[in-house]
Amino acid sequence: MISAVRHVALVGLMGSGKSTVGRRLARSLGREFVDTDTRVEVMSARSIRDIFTEDGEEGFRDRESQVLVEALDAVTSSVIATGGGVVLRDANRRSLVNHSVIWLRARPETLVDRVASSTRGGAEHRPLIGTDPLANLSLMANERRTMYEEVSDVIIDVDALAIDQIVRSCVEAVKELER
Ligand code: S3P
């Protein structure tokens, strides 16, 4: 279904800053902010880890797809921070096509540090990080690279950037994409 409203969606691996950047980007643009992970947790009244444990990854992905469709259906333009694995499903990638999608790209080495110092639940909302974060993030990076590429309009390499700089780059990218 083609949505009439063009949303901004942030994609990228866990720890790339989607939620932090997304919240600040939404404030800068004066738009609503949606975090798909948070919506899944609220909708299920459970943590992501509990959903993975009780319903498996597919149970989580079903909810994530549902939340994404609902967010993209909203009639006012918003900034959506997606979960790192949102690109795994074809349907999700297709539904992002008509929106402004920004990939916050980072090296796994950078992400390990950020995931470890995350203030948002850390390991509790990231069961896939496992006991060897660098190995798992590297695997995910390899598996998902082409999927992030497929959906992205803009790529921002965030390794050397502070949050402020990433937000500013996103604001510029959105202006350019919406011209
Ligand atoms: C996942 C990333 C997480 C969360 C879930 C699965 C992934 O979100 O959706 O643990 O598959 O990469 P963040 O990218 O916000 O950490």
Image (cartoon, rainbow, N blue to C red):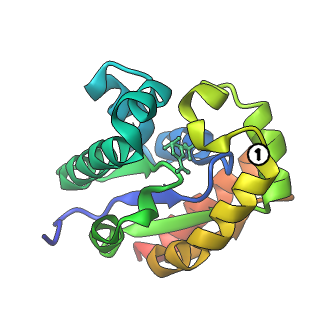
Identity of the residue drawn at 43% across and 57% down: 86
Identity of the residue drawn at 28% across and 42% down: 63
What residue occupies the far left of the structure in this picture?
Answer: 1
Provide residue 112's location: percent of width, then percent of height.
Answer: 80, 45
What residue occupies the far top of the structure in this picture?
Answer: 45
Q: Is residue 54 above or below residue 82?
A: above
Provide residue 96's location: percent of width, then percent of height.
Answer: 34, 68
Viewer can see residue 62 = yes
Q: Quadrant of residue 109?
A: bottom right
Q: Quadrant of the N terminus?
A: bottom left
Q: Is residue 134 shown left or right of residue 123?
A: right
Viewer can see residue 35 = no
**Crowd rating for badge 1 (residues with CA inside 10 Å; few <14, some 14–19, many 20+):** some
Q: Is residue 80 shown left or right of residue 59?
A: right
The front one of 175 and 69 is 69
The front one of 150 and 49 is 49
The front one of 20 and 125 is 125
Identity of the residue drawn at 23% across and 48% down: 66
Provide residue 48's location: percent of width, then percent of height.
Answer: 45, 31
Number of numbered discs visible in the structure rendering: 1
Provide residue 26's location: percent of width, then percent of height.
Answer: 47, 44
Q: Quadrant of the C terminus?
A: bottom left
Q: Is residue 6 shown left or right of residue 80?
A: left
Identity of the residue drawn at 68% across and 25% down: 119
Which amino acid lies under the numbered mark 1 shown in the image of this protein?
Answer: Pro
**Which residue carries the number 1 mark?**
133
